[in-house]
Image: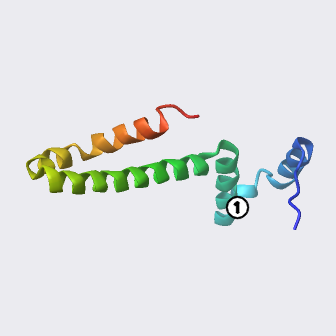
Amino acid sequence: MEVKNYTVEEVTKLFTDTVIATFAGTDDGQKHLNRIAKAITNESLDKRIQSQRETLAGIAFNKELAKVATKTPDKVSDLVSRKAAWIADYIVRKYGEGDE
């Protein structure tokens, strides 16, 4: 199956023909409008990337916690108390601070 690459003109026409004043008059219409806006702004993509990074950072934290628990158990409570900061620092170290 071939993927169609729309032109700006085609998308503009499709949008103006489809999204009329009453488009969001129903719950389904509102949901579609929300999806359109999220697609245009990459909001959903940004949220997925953020969620993925947080998940991977959480996995890395658990590995670090296991390592600390094995090698220096007296430092476990310090590491656990800094979990949120550790995860935030990990994300910055691994992925950078800004939007690439």
Q: Residue 73: where, in percent of width, then height? A: 11, 52
* Side of 25 relative to 70 (left or right): right
Q: Residue 100: where, in percent of width, then height? A: 58, 34
* Side of 42 relative to 98 (left or right): right
- Residue 79 higher or lower than 70, as above or below: above
Dot 1 falls on a residue whose secondary structure is: helix
Instruction: Say few, some or many: other residues with alpha carbon within 10 Å of mark 1 (under 14 / 14 to 19 / 20 or more).
Output: some
- Residue 27 higher or lower than 36, as above or below: below
Q: Residue 55: where, in percent of width, then height? A: 42, 55
Furthest-top residue in this view:
98
Furthest-bottom residue in this view:
1
At 12% from the left edge and 46% from the top edge, which residue is drawn? Answer: 75
At 64% from the left edge and 64% from the top edge, which residue is drawn? Answer: 27
| Quarter of the image with the N terminus in it | bottom right
Name the quadrant containing residue 28: bottom right
At 15% from the left edge and 52% from the top edge, which residue is drawn? Answer: 71
Q: Residue 96: where, in percent of width, then height? A: 48, 34
- Residue 72 higher or lower than 25, as above or below: above
Which of these two is toward me, 82 or 40? 82
- Residue 90 higher or lower than 56, as above or below: above
At 66% from the left edge and 58% from the top edge, which residue is drawn? Answer: 30
* Side of 96 relative to 75 (left or right): right
Which of these two is toward me, 94 or 71? 71
* Side of 45 relative to 21 (left or right): left
- Disc tally is 1
Instruction: Please name the amino acid that badge 1 sits on.
Output: Gly
Colour approach in the figure:
rainbow
- In the rendered image, which residue does mark 1 sit on? 29
Furthest-front residue in this view:
71
Which of these two is toward me, 19 or 82? 82
